[in-house]
Image (spheres, coloured by chain):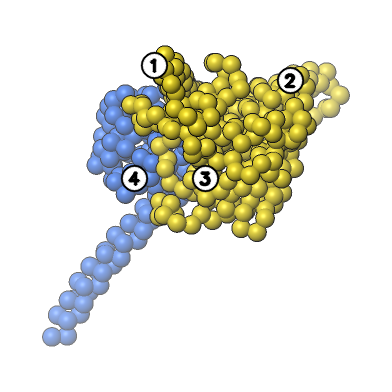
Amino acid sequence: MQGDGDHRPDRRNQPVSTRGGGKEVPLPGDGSKLPGSLDEVEGLLRESRARLAQAEKMAELGNLVAGIAHEMNTPLASVSSNTDTIALVLQKLNGLIVSEFPDESSPARRRFEEALSIAAESLRTSRLACDRILRLVGALRGFARHDDLRMQKADLHAVIESTLALVAHELKGRIKVVKEYGDLPEIECYPDQLNQVFMNLLVNAAQAITGPGEIRIRTSRDRDMVRISISDSGSGIPAELVSRVFDSGFTTKKAGEGTGLGLSISNRIVQSHGGRIELDGGAGRGATFTIVLPVRTTGERKTNEH
Amino acid sequence: MNTDTPRPSLLILDDEEMVLTSLRNLFRLQTEYEVIVHSSAREALESARTRPVDLVISDYLMPEMDGITFLGRFKEIQPQSIRVLLTGYADKENAIRAINQVGLYQYIEKPWDNAELLIVVKNGLEKRQLLRTLEEKIAELAKVNTNLKSLQTALLKAFL
């Protein structure tokens, strides 16, 4: 399964502390030697600052999104409720028409029924549309929320689905999502954080595919562990890069596209759950990231549970 | 519904008119309840002083005061009313804390499900009705007890 031994963040990298909330911004490069000239140090510092600014921008964007989702909730609640109420009104009207025009072939009854069926069909579409927005807004609110720090039992399939709802627009039409869901027990976790992990892996998978393609999500249980693998039909990750993809700051994307933090954050989140992320670079046939998580987490984190 | 008991009554408070319209229409269509709606907490409290209701539903996040403060004040005016809080997702924790604070009967999350909301309200009204019946029975018992006591006194007097 694993392409190459150890994929944890490369400890040889010397982290440079910044004042921004204690996040570590490592020096790029292989880190095996310290930079030489002052120019070089300045360059690295500039780069670190740029990354930090980018991370801050993402955090701001997250807050903005959460705020918008929150604002949308009340009008959406009203629309959703009205949709159901109107459906009941139409049912009532239908009953009235049947009793007022007992003759099924009467032109009046036909005209009423015709109008009602149009209204009912339009309303069904509204219901579906509304459900989709509800899911999306629900996912956005859940996603951006970081205040709930309790571990809870969660259905990972539901967590994956809520993430899929968020990235749907990025995949639409271009990438097919194939789900092979196995039987998973509920696991003890921080669902919001896992959302973030799935989001990172799914967006990466989508970006790895040029043109049309496929993302395959497989889930299975293996004794006390659950495995969630996300494979893309892209060109895979070259063997020489496989050991570095989890390093923070490592990115192959252009500035503005990636922060180089996604996979390292994902890795940290999964490790804090007592799990690991395995990577099969795929040797040119698409990469597979597999998240392995324990069903029950042991140790101090359990004490967070109420 | 029994015809000789008055219609159950609700008061709904939300600063968003669209929520009030949605809820009022839902109850108009599906129930026989008498529904009073308010978009201002102060007006709702004013109305509470003169008009008893069986159940009150309040939004949480409002400009004048939050839903828990409102329900607390409402409870002082009408202690016997059943109290329901309508909350956004982010306010859930507060709602749970409020259960003891204002004797909250239930909280409902926005966006609510019509069918679920109707059941919560129906059960709340049933509880209110049961409590009222209980009060009446206790009052009856007390009355019978007093009668018995005076009868006993009369009996004792007659024999002594």
Up-down: is B114 above or below A253? below
The mark lying in front, picked from 1 and 2, is: 1
Report whether residue A38 is seen.
yes
Badges 4 and 1, same chain = no
Viewed as shown, does residue A49 lie left or right of A275?
Answer: left
Q: Residue at x 33, y 57 (%)?
A: B135
Q: CA distance from mark 3 to mark 4?
A: 33 Å
Label 2 sits on a secondary structure element that is loop
Q: CA distance from mark 1 to mark 3?
A: 36 Å
Query: Mark 4 — residue?
Result: B97
Towards the viewer: A251 or B145? A251
Towards the viewer: A200 or A121? A200
> Which amino acid, mark 3?
Gln
Report whether residue A96 is seen.
no
The chain holding disc 2 is A
Query: Mark 3 — residue?
Result: A271
Query: Mark 2 — residue?
Result: A210
Q: Earlier in the sequence, mark 1 or mark 2?
A: 1
Quarter of the N terminus of chain A within the rendering: top right
Q: In the orientation shown, which residue stands out farthest toward the right?
A: A105
Q: Earlier in the sequence, mark 2 or mark 3?
A: 2
